Image (cartoon, helix red, strand yellow):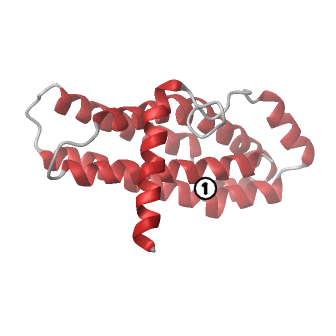
Amino acid sequence: MIIDILSREHRNIERLLNVLEHELDIFDHAAPDYEVIGSIIAYFEVYTELYHHRQEDLIFARLRQRDPAAAAKMGDLAREHQKGSDGLHRVAHAVANVRAGGEIPRENVDAVIRDFLAYERRHIMMEDRDFFPAAVKALTPQDWADIASTLSPHKDPLFSDATEARFDVLRAHIMELEKEAEAERH
């Protein structure tokens, strides 16, 4: 089901947010891995903005038709996605300035990235808690079939079996961080 895929993508996005936060913690006292940060930004620009949010927007449009009251409780999902996109562009701009040697205080970069992290986490939590259950409850099997017929067959470029080469470094970094975290827990 489409919601299962979107939920799995949310878990993967949370993994990326954790990696970005880890790199930010490093940035607070040393040089982070800019290749990893750049890959995270690229992932959000490519997959999240072009595919993931598009799917959610299609579902939300159908939810507005089937249960306007439930949709109204969530506000304007497309605007929420745009706010996330704007935050991502601020992150990309701040990182590009740092990499270009710009005189930008670390606190400013830290604040921009932490704002993005917090916003994305709140957004995902709202969708998981409110949007997805409302859609599952309100949409019909025909609604889901209609939505599925309009979706791109494009697979997640980072977490699918056919990982895109530009995300290989990021995927390896995520796996290493998760392995380290697991070792610390034991």
Q: Quadrant of residue 95?
A: top left
Q: Farthest residue to the left: give it.
A: 103
Q: Tell me the amino acid under the disc marked 1.
A: Glu
The residue pinned by badge 1 equals 127
Q: Is residue 147 above or below residue 182?
A: above
138 or 91: which is nearer to us?
91
Give percent across and percent down for residue 37. Answer: 34, 38
In percent of the image, x 48 and y 37: which residue is there?
Answer: 82
Query: Badge 1: few (under 14), some or many (20 or more) residues near its Cα, within 10 Å?
Result: some
Q: Farthest residue to the bottom: give it.
A: 186
In percent of the image, x 38 and y 52: which residue is there?
Answer: 117
In percent of the image, x 62 and y 35: which residue is there?
Answer: 156
Give percent across and percent down for residue 50. Answer: 57, 29
Q: Is residue 92 left or right of residue 127?
A: left
Q: Is residue 74 left or right of residue 97?
A: right
Whether residue 181 is visible, yes or no, is: yes
73 or 106: which is nearer to us?
106
Q: Farthest residue to the right: give it.
A: 142
- Report helix, strand or loop for mark 1: helix
The quarter of the rendered structure image containing the C terminus is bottom left
Q: Quadrant of residue 157?
A: top right
Q: How many marks?
A: 1
Q: Quadrant of residue 109?
A: top left
Q: Is residue 183 above or below residue 84?
A: below
Give percent across and percent down for residue 139. Answer: 83, 50
